[in-house]
């Protein structure tokens, strides 16, 4: 069997603490920007936000809405959950406020940079495949100092195809000049990351940050 020559990584939840950044930004947003008549407790707001945000993110990933538009509409949908209207101008204001607060909280996991350096020293080529907006995802890599560690970064918003579609993995194969058998993909999600890598014929490695047991259809490796 061909030797694994490159390790390709997911970004959010794998290298970058996306949930922590989101949580901290939303706490500030609820405290200082949200103008609901009766504000919910933060844990309720966070739960509702994530349910709404996941729905609208999927619309973006399936090319049904632009990146900014889905972020504006999710505020309208969030307010509707609480029985209030969110005028377009207010939704746009909240979109801008959240984007600023969220970017201020971008940070890599403590071990990310050291782990990448160790892998490079071991002779592996390193790359990233991430779902999301190209400007935002590349901004995370720059702000966290991780960008110089990767020779190739592929963002779904730039190529209009998203994980787990094997097509995005094929684009990375072409850029790296490697076959599926020479590539491993590391990610924290079994649906997008593990399933996508397996469908593409790559070695999937599940980074289990939550300590949850895998299913029978889980990844080949767990770290």
Image (tube, grey):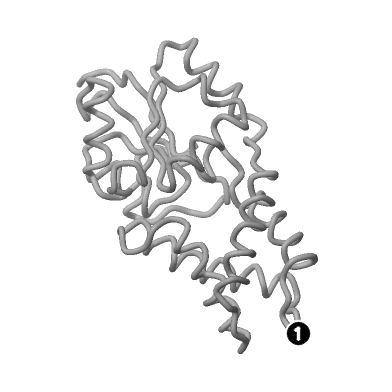
- Name the one closer to the observer, 26 or 16: 26
Lateral position of residue 101 relative to residue 167, left or right: right
Q: Residue furthest bottom?
A: 83
Q: Which residue is mark 1?
A: 38
Residue 103 on image: x %, y %: 64, 45
Q: Residue furthest right?
A: 31
Residue located 58% across and 39% down the image: 16
Residue 162 on image: x %, y %: 32, 49
Q: Residue furthest front?
A: 89
Residue located 45% across and 22% down the image: 150
- Name the one closer to the observer, 72 or 120: 72
Lateral position of residue 219 relative to residue 50, left or right: left
* Location of residue 79 (image quadrant): bottom right
Lateral position of residue 5 relative to residue 95, left or right: left
Of helix, strand and loop, which one carries label 1? loop
Quick check: 157 above or below 62?
above
Quick check: 97 above or below 43?
above
Which of the image's four quarters has the N terminus?
Answer: top left
């Amino acid at each position: 069997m061909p030797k694994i020559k490159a390790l390709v990584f997911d970004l959010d939840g794998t290298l970058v603490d996306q949930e922590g950044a989101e949580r901290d930004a939303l706490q500030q947003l609820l405290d200082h920007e949200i103008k609901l008549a009766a504000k919910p407790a933060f844990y309720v707001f966070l739960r509702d936000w994530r349910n709404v945000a996941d729905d609208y993110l999927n619309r973006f990933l399936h090319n049904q809405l632009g990146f900014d538009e889905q972020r504006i509409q999710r505020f309208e949908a969030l307010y509707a959950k609480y029985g209030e209207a969110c005028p377009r101008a207010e939704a746009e204001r909240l979109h801008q406020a959240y984007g600023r607060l969220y970017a201020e909280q971008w940070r890599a996991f403590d071990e990310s940079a050291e782990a990448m350096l160790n892998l490079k020293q071991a002779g592996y080529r390193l790359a990233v495949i991430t779902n999301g907006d190209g400007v935002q995802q590349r901004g995370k890599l720059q702000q966290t100092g991780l960008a110089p560690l990767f020779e190739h970064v592929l963002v779904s918003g730039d190529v209009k195809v998203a994980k787990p579609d094997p097509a995005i993995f094929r684009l990375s194969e072409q850029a790296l000049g490697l076959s599926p058998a020479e590539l491993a993909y590391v990610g924290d999600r079994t649906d997008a990351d593990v399933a996508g890598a397996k469908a593409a014929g790559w070695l999937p490695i599940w980074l289990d940050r939550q300590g949850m047991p895998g299913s029978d259809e889980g990844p080949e490796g767990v770290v």
